[in-house]
Image (cartoon, rainbow, N blue to C red):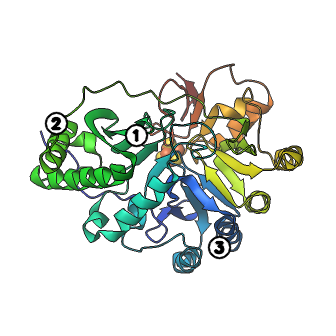
Amino acid sequence: MTSPRLRADACPGALQTHSAADGELARVRVPGGLLTAAQLRALAAAARDLGDGALEMTSRGNLQLRGLAPGAARELGDRLAAAGLLPSETHERVRNVLASALTGRAGGLLDARPWVAALDAGLLADPALAALPGRYLATLDDGRGDVSGLGGDVGLLAMSPSSVALLLAGEDSGLRTGPSDAVGLLLTATRAFLAERDAQGGTAWRLAELDDGPARVAARVAARLGGARSAPVAVPPAPSLGPVGAETQADGRTALIGVVPLGRIAAGQAELLASLTGEVQLTPWRSVVVPDLAEDRVDDAAVDLHRTGMVFDAASPWARVTACAGRPGCARSLADVRADAAAAVASGAVPDETRVHWAGCERRCGRPRGEVLDVVATADGYRVS
Ligand code: SF4
């Protein structure tokens, strides 16, 4: 069997927008979820001037702007390029890179941030890689095991400070390298994916969609690099919840990690975040890491952010509740799922220790991986399953 895909993916980008019921939708790739304060300010201004006034977080740590007027994508593109958020028009949709939350600041076996920069540069430097699908995902795990289970096509998982495993479709390939050669190995695997896709004559969007994809891509990589393979190890499953609250960094400063209810960052909230620190990290759990805070600034920062709706209590239902766009943003939706999810949280109707995903139709966009209670709108009301 070859890939069942008959067409190229139509994932939105910053320039290739998607027409939604509430206007054009643009998706801005944020490799590693890492944004400087200046970039966050530029995004907040764009959301306010061109969109619906907010930034929407995705499960891949990217950001979306909704409600754009027809033709606004060009001005958005100019603003993003000026802020360093659109380094290439040809490769903008292929920069899907998840990195461990807090990497380089607290926990982990190494700092994955240099990998993020090197991978992004490597993707942009190769014209052939513009052909990657917009859904292709790389995970860069510093050894804490938080992003390796999140459905990457290719991934790096630090096994020790000096040994890194190459993951293919979320499984260990047995191929190993050192940290400084790891991004090169990942790029070799990415080119092998495209070569195998061509060989199978399909338009697969994901490595796992190829016939025997992980094994064939691993064989192509091994043939190029030579060398023995290690016995594959089990890849840690994705944690159901990300970190929330305060973490002491290795340098003694503090990182605050706040959940953004339903992943919607208001422009003013983004500006407040930008005023507190030089760089933030967006996480796949729809939270934001606010790092590098001096001890005497932590409490005030948490109070100010909490006033804007951010949540720092890991036991809050907001750490477990997600929703798709729903009405009025999505024409397919049978309900305003975000309003209904918020009402459920406010009334205490969310069961303890259970992740709940609200969706306006059976597609269940944005559903987290793993065990989740689905609340799906139907013509007859919500179905809970
Ligand atoms: S799950 Fe359905 S209603 Fe929700 S965003 Fe996706 S297509 Fe739209």
For the residues bearing labels 1 and 3, Cβ distance under 8 angstroms: no
* Of residues 313 and 223, the one drawn nearer to the viewer in this rendering: 223
Which of the two marks, 1 or 2, is nearer to us in this view?
Answer: 1
Kind of residue indicated by mark 3:
Leu
Q: Position of residue 362 (x, y in %)?
A: 46, 36
Q: Position of residue 64 (x, y in %)?
A: 57, 59
As measured in the structure, the alpha-carbon distance from the residue carrying label 1 to the one carrying label 2 is: 30 Å
Q: Residue at x 43, y 54 (%)?
A: 96
Kind of residue indicated by mark 2:
Asp
Quadrant location of residue 118?
Answer: bottom left
Against 228, residue 11 (above or below) is below
Whichever of labels 3 and 2 marks the residue nearer the N terminus, that label is 3
Helix, strand or loop for disc 3: helix
Quadrant location of residue 318?
Answer: top right
Which of the two marks, 3 or 2, is nearer to us in this view?
Answer: 2
Q: Position of residue 66 (x, y in %)?
A: 60, 62
Kind of residue indicated by mark 1:
Ser
Question: Could you tell me which quadrant the N terminus lies in?
Answer: top left
Whichever of labels 1 and 3 marks the residue nearer the N terminus, that label is 3
Helix, strand or loop for disc 1: loop
For the residues bearing labels 3 and 2, Cβ distance under 8 angstroms: no
Within 10 Å of disc 1 (Cα), the crowding (few <14, some 14-19, many 20+) is few
As measured in the structure, the alpha-carbon distance from the residue carrying label 1 to the one carrying label 3 is: 46 Å
- Per the image, the residue denoted by label 3 is 50
- Per the image, the residue denoted by label 2 is 212
- Per the image, the residue denoted by label 1 is 162
